[in-house]
Image (cartoon, rainbow, N blue to C red):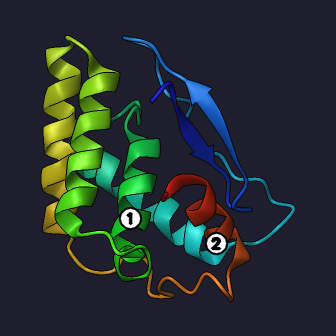
Amino acid sequence: DNGISVIHSSGRTHSVPWSEGQLIPTFYTMRDESCPVMDDIAQRCKEIANMAGDTSEILSNLCYHHQICYLCSAETETSDSACDMTFLTKANNLCGDSPRCRYTARRTMATMHSLRGDPSPLGCDWRKYTCLGHYLLANMR
């Protein structure tokens, strides 16, 4: 994988390349279209980053992907453990040899596990929230 998709609340994505030590751009919101499911995910990941000590939010985009993976696991026929493995693999790739980053990734995973439950009370209703459907098509293959 040569990059990671940055998600917007509209559901639009674009791929951002990464290299060892490069920061993933933090999630930002385009206010031209409302997407409450993505807003819920973004808020939850901000809380997770805060609790895990990820002050730079370097793992935020991986968190978004992980939380959507959990939220839509039934629809995408993906297990929670597969979501976890994807997060850890991409975090290791992102962190490279940085012990601090790897430690933060482990803390982020532990925090996500402590907050089990649906990341959004709205569920994975991709038919109602087309922004979520667009994200799933672009990222959950």
At x 18%, y 20%, the residue is 100
Mark 1 neighbour class, 10 Å CA radius: few under 14, some 14 to 19, many 20 or more: many
Residues 77 and 83: in front is: 77
Residues 82 and 105: in front is: 82
At x 17%, y 61%, the residue is 81
- Residue 54's image quarter? top left
Residue 42 position, x and y percent, is 51, 59
Badge 1 amino acid = Cys
Q: Which residue is mark 2?
A: 133
Q: Which residue is mark 1?
A: 69
Report whether 106 appears left or right of 82: left
At x 20%, y 11%, the residue is 97
| Residues at discs 1 and 2 in contact (Cβ within 8 Å) | no
Mark 2 neighbour class, 10 Å CA radius: few under 14, some 14 to 19, many 20 or more: some
Quadrant housing the N terminus: top left
- For residue 55, above or below residue 131: above
